[in-house]
Amino acid sequence: MKSNNEDKWLIQIRKGMFELAILSLLSHKPMYGYEISMALKHSTVFTISEGAIYPILRRMTEKEWIEFFWGESNEGPRRKYYQITEEGRVILEYRIEKYKEMYASLQTLREGGLDTDHGQNGSIH
């Protein structure tokens, strides 16, 4: 069973990763809001309600990481499609690299850590 603090920790981690997940999706093709939320729901990690995605998309648009255009739909009214900008691609690549660095460091620590005693016996102090 998970503690309440652990649940809060996971929520914070996911919140920080939503922008990265959305940029990753949009790096492949333009998508509309509902389509983005459905793609995220296919992942067990990034489930988000349709309504909760729009404030994130608005914030990312204001940062100029994504932009939108109106497109026709075969199923009803026009849709607002989002696409990644060049700035968004730069942010995506930067954050993916930082994520990889953090993950690699965590793995190193988990496997015994960094040699902090300058080679004396290989243990962590």
Image: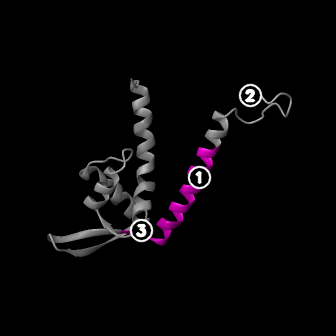
Image quadrant in which the N terminus is located: top left
**Visible residue check, residue 56:** yes
Residue to which mark 2 is pinned: 124
Is 91 included in the stretch rendered in magenta? Answer: yes
Q: Secondary structure at mark 2?
A: loop
Give the quadrant of residue 121.
Answer: top right
Image x and y of residue 38, in percent:
28, 55
Alpha carbons under labels 3 and 1: distance apart:
21 Å
Q: Considering only order in the chain, which callout, 2 or 1, is on the residue closer to the N terminus?
A: 1
Residue to which mark 1 is pinned: 98
Q: Considering only order in the chain, which callout, 1 or 3, is on the residue closer to the N terminus?
A: 3
Mark 3 and mark 2 in contact? Answer it, CB < 8 Å: no
What amino acid is at disc 3? His
Provide the residue span drawn in magenta: 83-104
Q: Residue at x 28, y 50 (%)?
A: 52
Q: Quick one: label 3, few (<14), some, or many (20+) residues within 10 Å?
A: few
Judged by depth in the image, the label closer to the viewer, 3 or 1, is: 3
Residue 86, above or below 121: below
Give the quadrant of residue 4.
Answer: top left
Q: Is residue 12 left or right of residue 124?
A: left
